[in-house]
Amino acid sequence: MITSVLVANRGEIACRVFRTCRESGIRTVAVYSDADEHALHARVADTAVRLPGTASADTYLRGDLIVKAAVTAGADAVHPGYGFLSENADFARAVTDAGLTWIGPPPEAIEAMASKTRAKELMGIAPLGEVTEADLPVLVKAAAGGGGRGMRVVRRTADLDAELTAARAEAASAFGDGEVFVEPYVENGRHVEVQILADTHGTVWALGTRDCSLQRRHQKVIEEAPAPGLTASLTEDLYEQAVRAARAVDYAGAGTVEFLVADGRAHFLEMNTRLQVEHPVTEAVFGIDLVALQLRVAEGHALEAGPPPARGHAVEARLYAEDPARGWAPQTGRLHRLAVPDGVRLDTGYTDGDDIGVHYDPMLAKAVAHAPTRAEAVRRLAGALERAAIHGPVTNRDLLVRSLRHEEFTSARMDTGFYDRHLAALTEPAPDPLAPLAAALADAQGRSRFGGGWRNVPSQPQVKRYALAGVEHEVRYHHTRDGLTADGVRVLHADAARVVLEADGVRHTYEIARYGDRVHANTTALTPLPRFPDPTTQHAPGSLLAPMPGTVVRVAEGLTEGTTVKAGQPLLWLEAMKMEHKITAPVTGTLAALNAVPGQQVTVGSLLAVVQAP
């Protein structure tokens, strides 16, 4: 019997596994890097062991340190989570060689399937060799790992070498393995996968399908189960291929077989030999706990002959600290509050007051809704996200709500090109016009409580300015004998924490929260602007500023000051939150300054380079 589990991972997945372990009476052990010293997963575990350093290569990718931590903490089993070493056969062997129970598939199965090139060979599919114009577009893909890292779509043969180099570097950084391969890129297919669960007694369950077509940078954003609109014959083919893949490698434990579905056919992509981020939608539909079943399989128990019946529909949305309107740029800072309405499952590795750093994935949480029908589940999730309190850095919350309500999604006609087609419309600012007024009135009442406020000329309008969705908004209101008034809007109530307004006969209630220089009026985040703005730092034309905090991982080969560059030419690459971001020349001209070197840590707004136009 397993009595103590170390989770060789961090954040949300570690917290998720710990929850099941606690319910099962199993002690929990966390590992944490220096950057995660105060992380939620390190706080909620029964025991936590430090991995010195911040980079993944020095901490969560160090299998030797993790095995040592498990032995030192008295754990008798290791759960790999997903990402990092979860699909590393050598790590699985190291765990079992140390006398610990491995909560995952046999190392031989990982070896056969964790490398996407070997998995395709096992399924009778060969990767592309020499790429010609007739093969385009193609996809460069990391042989190990997942999560969209080490993947590049190539549409011109002239770009192939550069994208291969970039993919190798990103894959080596994320997974410790720089092997990549090239395969045909299926345009606008649906990403459909099958959850499998197998025991060591020959039973394999196919636990339904999932649709994960809404993706950014080849990383899933919204997932659902079952995949809508599949024919019975196509579903049966997906099940057959998934089970065949599992049996081919004597699989045991939880895993996922992924496909692209196009023109009514299923194209095998890969088998992920681990638990997936989106596993909660399958749990909701089948009424099971996949982590609990993983534990039972690892202990040698047999599964029932078949899975329980599926009921209803589930949808999951990944909440990221990122700005979709700015190239999905990751965001950092203090997460002051995160709360969703009751009735929606929230899996997260953060709690109120936690800091979001630059070292790891920007996913804050997964929100999951389950209902009897797809339409009801989608409506429930969109409504919950719309009303959620998310106070802190910019997130993709508005994008998620709009995506869930988009006609192409509600009618189940989406594919992997969804955001390529609709991102601009989905990120168009739509600010609440009354939110700045509510914030201003709450601020006025808050100041008046402490002896502030305007007293000399109460008949004159008071003015406050806010930045909202990148646009400046000016608010005017009056102090009168009867209280606060604003043109065209009735002020029914106003105090420092709550404002009630009436416009065109409709009542609007705002809950106000303040955190430093940010104000939240319900779900709208505003930044107060000074009455007399300070002069801002001026940068020379053609200056390239860091769009996010991160690390300079590469500078283009041969790039030096004085080099002639072309508009759009890649100059350097930043790594932030496990993703690489390419910085390109804004114009054709001369590189007048290059301030970036590999390994350099930069903050938002740091001057990286200057390109002077002729």
Image (spheres, rainbow, N blue to C red):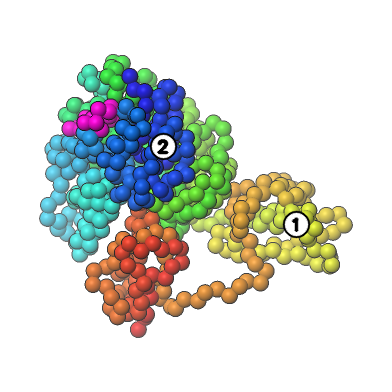
Identity of the residue drawn at 41% across and 27% down = 27
Q: Nearer the viewer, mark 2 or mark 1?
A: 2
The local secondary structure at tag 1 comes to: helix
Report the front residue among 404 and 100. Answer: 100
Q: CA distance from mark 2 to mark 1?
A: 45 Å
Q: Is residue 554 left or right of residue 413?
A: left
Q: Residue furthest right?
A: 481
Give 165 or 310, whichever is nearer the viewer.
Answer: 165
Secondary structure category for the residue under label 2: strand
Quadrant of res 102: top left
What label does residue 447 carry, if any? Answer: 1
Is residue 208 among what the camera can see? no
Q: Which residues are magenta?
A: 95-109
Q: Is residue 100 magenta?
A: yes
Residue 396 against residue 163 in the figure, above or below = above
Q: Is residue 78 above or below residue 127?
A: above
Please identify the quadrant where the C terminus is shown.
Answer: bottom left
Asked if residue 515 shows in the view, the reply is: yes
Residue 523 position within the rendered picture, expressed as x and y whole percent measured from the top left: 59, 48
**327 lies left or right of 597:** right
Pinpoint residue 546: horizontal percent, then vertical percent.
Answer: 42, 65
289 in the magenta segment = no
